[in-house]
Image (cartoon, grey):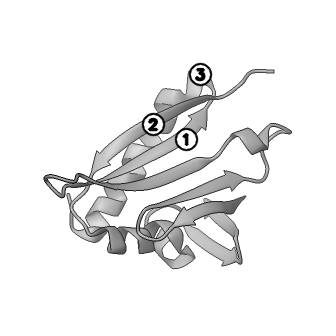
């Protein structure tokens, strides 16, 4: 069985960590930039794109710092794969970045990175950071 490889991308963004956290951790925030619609019940999030639904579980989070989700429909190896969105503030310059960690099959990494770039561009427009 082919394993997915982990990748990480960083996006500078001009917004407060508190504001960003609302957009990455709540169903109402996520549906504004990440998916067409998002519903949540407890730690279970339902993401809808073009009528197709994917279910993820919020497995870890720290206020104004990061969220980590795990897709529930992955193979038996689903415990290994997650996606994390981390808010990083440079101690000296106070510049804010989002660092995305995700997994994709080797031949899909570039496509996955482009998808994240597109989604983060939507988030940047939403928060006035283009």
Secondary structure at numbered mark 3? helix
Label 2 neighbour load within 10 Å: few <14, some 14-19, many 20+: few
The structure residue drawn at horizontal position 62% and vertical position 61%, both measured from the top left corner, is 60
Distance, label 2 to label 1, CA atoms, is 6 Å
Residue sticking out furthest to the right:
76
35 w.r.t. 72: above or below: below
The structure residue drawn at horizontal position 77% and vertical position 53%, both measured from the top left corner, is 72
In percent of width and height, residue 10 lies at 34, 42
Secondary structure at numbered mark 2? strand
Which corner quadrant holds the N terminus? top right
The structure residue drawn at horizontal position 36% and vertical position 68%, both measured from the top left corner, is 20
User: Mark 2 or mark 1: which comes first in sequence?
Assistant: 2
Distance, label 2 to label 3, CA atoms, is 14 Å
Q: Which residue is labeled 3 in the image?
A: 106
In percent of width and height, residue 8 lies at 45, 36
The structure residue drawn at horizontal position 47% and vertical position 74%, both measured from the top left corner, is 29
Write down the quadrant of residue 123 in the picture: bottom left
Q: Nearer the viewer, mark 1 or mark 3?
A: 1
Residue 102 is marked as 1
13 w.r.t. 45: above or below: above
Distance, label 1 to label 3, CA atoms, is 12 Å
Q: Which residue is labeled 2 in the image?
A: 8
Write down the quadrant of residue 54 in the picture: bottom right
């Amino acid at each position: 069985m082919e394993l997915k490889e982990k990748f990480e991308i960083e996006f500078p963004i001009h917004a407060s960590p508190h504001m960003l956290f609302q957009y990455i951790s709540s169903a109402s925030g996520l549906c504004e930039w990440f998916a067409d619609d998002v519903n949540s019940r407890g730690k279970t999030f339902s993401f809808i794109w073009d009528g197709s639904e994917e279910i993820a579980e919020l497995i870890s989070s720290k206020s104004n710092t990061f969220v980590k989700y795990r897709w529930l429909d992955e193979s038996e190896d689903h415990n290994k794969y997650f996606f994390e969105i981390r808010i990083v503030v440079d101690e000296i310059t106070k510049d804010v970045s989002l660092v995305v960690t995700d997994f994709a099959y080797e031949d899909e990494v570039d496509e996955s990175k482009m998808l994240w770039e597109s989604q983060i561009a939507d988030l940047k427009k939403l928060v006035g950071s283009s």
